[in-house]
Image (spheres, coloured by chain):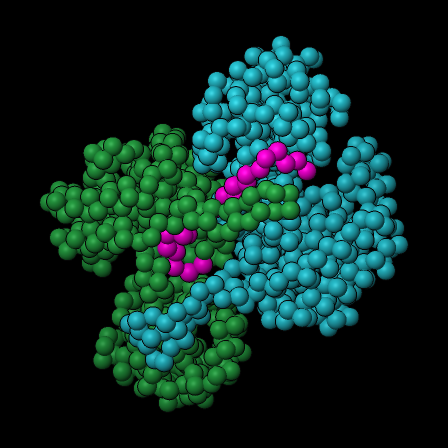
Chain colours: A cyan, B green
């Protein structure tokens, strides 16, 4: 299975690397139209995933993540057109010069080759991942969750129909229909076929990939994000920011999971925050000893709570004596995704940004802005929480590598 | 052991990330002087490694790689001064803009944090790796081979003495004195301490690291480099290039290990090459069926020979019917380091550079030029043969990551 599909994408990657920008863009726009035309087929297959999920008693939030309807299919099509509109990074020259020996040395941007994506639940990732890989001249081997298998199969089938119609290699995208753990593990070790592996999903999935993979991995997406409300904070602003970061969309990785509060303002701030946030949505507070009496109905936070990405209306609360303690606490428990300080103090803002070890460090803003579109990348294949290759939102460039091309006329050393 | 040293470098990395460029450069220049002053101490300790190696019957080439003498210590000092003279990449702003919400977004270059290096034999890597990591604000945990342990210990000791004298954290560099495989494996899985792992050495070492590591790895250095002599090649030029790439320094990764020859010129070229190369140094040819009768004393090449980095006066020889076959052969067996075509054909040159999947692809030049200094990076911590993060020679930038800093005035989404 993996041997066949792996060899397919490897072979396809050679052909894709040579496609012109025009051919790639035309295809993505054609595929957008085709998806919309095939709305009924997609909804029909998706219904089987929904039925299975409901039968298994999956929560409505999770069932909703699986659901494809007319609007969501139209959104996928819009996404394809947006990717078509982005500049093509392939072929870009990063630097070039003639060296002392007269060698003409140029560093050029090239595709990664064959990309493996292992993801959970949302079937729109299938189309997103394909479009970003295709635009950058990469072939992609997808391994989605078993819960979305019917949706993923029909989406890949439609992409392949379009590839074939356009005279392009159908192996530009392959989907592992065997969603067993054993097959996924083989994929993680398919060095001979895959140049990179991008897992997207829960902390558990990402840790399993890190452990088992021999293919180079880009870690993405786990966001245990924290907001620190400093002594000098504008408490109205802090309230708005915490409410937004916690409640606007709690299931996403840039939502806040933890609040750190300076002890001197905890008395005033925490009851005020609780009152305001409950008007938007009830939130469960898991508080340390000092914060516990200030939040009605709060439960005592465990060590584990501070390191947990709840993805729910739950917020851990820690009180600190000052900036240094706040920074140490965050660097200890965060997943290095996005952290924010609310402060009026210039030097505190600067120190926080310098010393917090995360992909995105905010001053006086919600963590919810960490996103490829907001950061000007035009698209996003995930948010890297590691320091190698790409950090933070990953756009098209994160799907490329480089190559040195050297032209000589007989130079030896 | 690893718990203690890992925690040390992790802690040190926080302090190092804040050092000014001036402090870092002054320290490197001071260390250069100190190394030279301590020449006798270094040579004395190195002698124990040499004695052990000789007692174990290690080959003279390998013993020579271990040897530190006055000249080599002076060369290490020169290397330190060169690193001090390079621009400091830390703090560089890669991009920045104000987004639609009024957020001021800046992407800044930051250190990786704590770097793990696993290397073999040559003790000068200790000083090289430290200097590049220190210049980029990283702490480094070193694990050298047991054969160089006395040399590595004294070099790290001298670095620590200088750090202490300069009032800097001694934990900027740590050396695993336990050189067991078990301890090395723990290091490969020390995610809580290390941000990246750079193995430097044999294919076996690098494969073991890839298999065992959970810390993100940058693969380096295995160079099974090939030269393709095309039908239209200037055969005198081709001879000079092959002789240089094979014999000038056969033990390094950018030396050629394999020769691919167009069948139409094999009759003329191979005997001519053999005669010329033997005047420089006798070379063992491992040839395919067509080349075998053209090279006196050649042995039949096995499948394995084409995939082997000999690091010796051995050259595998393959004949092909044309460019496509040459490209397919090289892409199948190469280690994606450096490959070269010798040709007069413009379109062949272009196609070779496009389709060969390697870090450096040459036209009419020796592969021996793949090197951080030649490519304008000023220094080199290794040559990456993977596509993530860095490809080809890695200079200071390869030891950095980035961070998004976002300044707001209360923005919510």
In which quadrant is the C terminus of chain A drawn? bottom left
Magenta segment, principal secondary structure? strand
How far across and down, in percent of the image, does residue A42 sit? 84, 53
Farthest left residue in view: B40
Seen at 49% across and 25% down, the residue is A326
**Percent of width and height locating residue B276:** 27, 82
> Is residue B405 on the magenta stretch?
yes
Report the front residue among A161 and A32. Answer: A32
Q: Is residue B311 left or right of residue B159?
A: right
Name the image quarter holding residue A26: bottom right
Of residues A288 and A217, which is closer to you in this image?
A: A288
- Residue at 68% x, 38% y: name it: B413
Query: Quick check: A198 above or below A326?
Result: below
Which residue appears at 73% of the width and 73% of the height?
A167
The magenta span reads B391-413
Say if A142 sits above or below A313 in the image.
below
Q: Quadrant of the N terminus of chain A?
A: bottom right
x, y percentage for residue A238?
Answer: 61, 26
- Outermost residue to the top: A293
At x 89%, y 54%, the residue is A40
Residue A184 visible: no
Q: Position of residue A217 (x, y in %)?
A: 54, 48
């Amino acid at each position: 299975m993996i041997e066949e599909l792996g060899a397919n994408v490897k072979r396809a990657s050679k052909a894709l690397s040579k496609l012109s920008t025009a051919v790639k863009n035309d295809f993505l726009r054609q595929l957008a139209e085709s998806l919309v035309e095939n709305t009924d087929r997609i909804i029909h297959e998706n219904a089987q995933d929904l039925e299975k999920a409901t039968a298994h008693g999956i929560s409505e939030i999770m069932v909703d993540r699986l659901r494809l309807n007319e609007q969501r299919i139209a959104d996928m099509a819009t996404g394809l057109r947006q990717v078509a509109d982005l500049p093509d990074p392939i072929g870009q020259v990063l630097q070039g010069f003639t060296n002392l020996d007269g060698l003409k040395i140029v560093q050029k941007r090239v595709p990664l080759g064959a990309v493996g994506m292992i993801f959970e639940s949302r079937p729109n990732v299938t189309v997103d991942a394909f479009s970003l890989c295709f635009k950058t001249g990469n072939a992609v081997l997808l391994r989605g969750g078993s819960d979305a298998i019917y949706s993923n199969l029909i989406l890949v089938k439609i992409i392949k129909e379009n590839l074939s119609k356009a005279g392009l290699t159908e192996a530009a995208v392959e989907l592992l229909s065997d969603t067993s753990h054993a097959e996924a593990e083989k994929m993680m070790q398919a060095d001979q076929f895959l140049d990179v592996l991008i897992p997207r999903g829960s902390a558990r999935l990402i840790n399993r990939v890190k452990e088992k993979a021999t293919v180079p991995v880009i870690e993405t997406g786990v966001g245990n994000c924290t907001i620190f409300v400093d002594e000098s904070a504008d408490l109205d602003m802090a309230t708005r920011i915490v409410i937004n970061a916690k409640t606007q969309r709690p299931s996403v990785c840039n939502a806040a999971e933890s609040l750190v509060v300076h002890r001197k303002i905890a008395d005033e701030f925490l009851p005020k925050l609780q009152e305001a946030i409950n008007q938007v949505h009830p939130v469960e507070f898991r508080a340390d000893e000092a914060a516990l009496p200030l939040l009605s109905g709060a439960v005592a936070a465990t060590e584990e709570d501070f390191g947990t990405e709840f993805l729910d209306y739950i917020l851990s609360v820690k009180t600190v004596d000052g900036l240094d303690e706040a920074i140490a606490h965050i660097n200890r428990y965060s997943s290095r995704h996005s952290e924010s300080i609310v402060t009026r103090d210039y030097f505190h803002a600067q120190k926080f940004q310098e010393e917090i070890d995360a992909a995105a460090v905010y001053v006086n803003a919600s963590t919810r802005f960490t996103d490829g579109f907001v950061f000007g990348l035009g698209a996003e294949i995930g948010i890297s929480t590691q320091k190698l290759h790409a950090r933070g939102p990953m756009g098209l460039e994160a799907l490329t590598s480089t190559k040195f091309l050297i032209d000589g006329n007989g130079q030896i050393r």
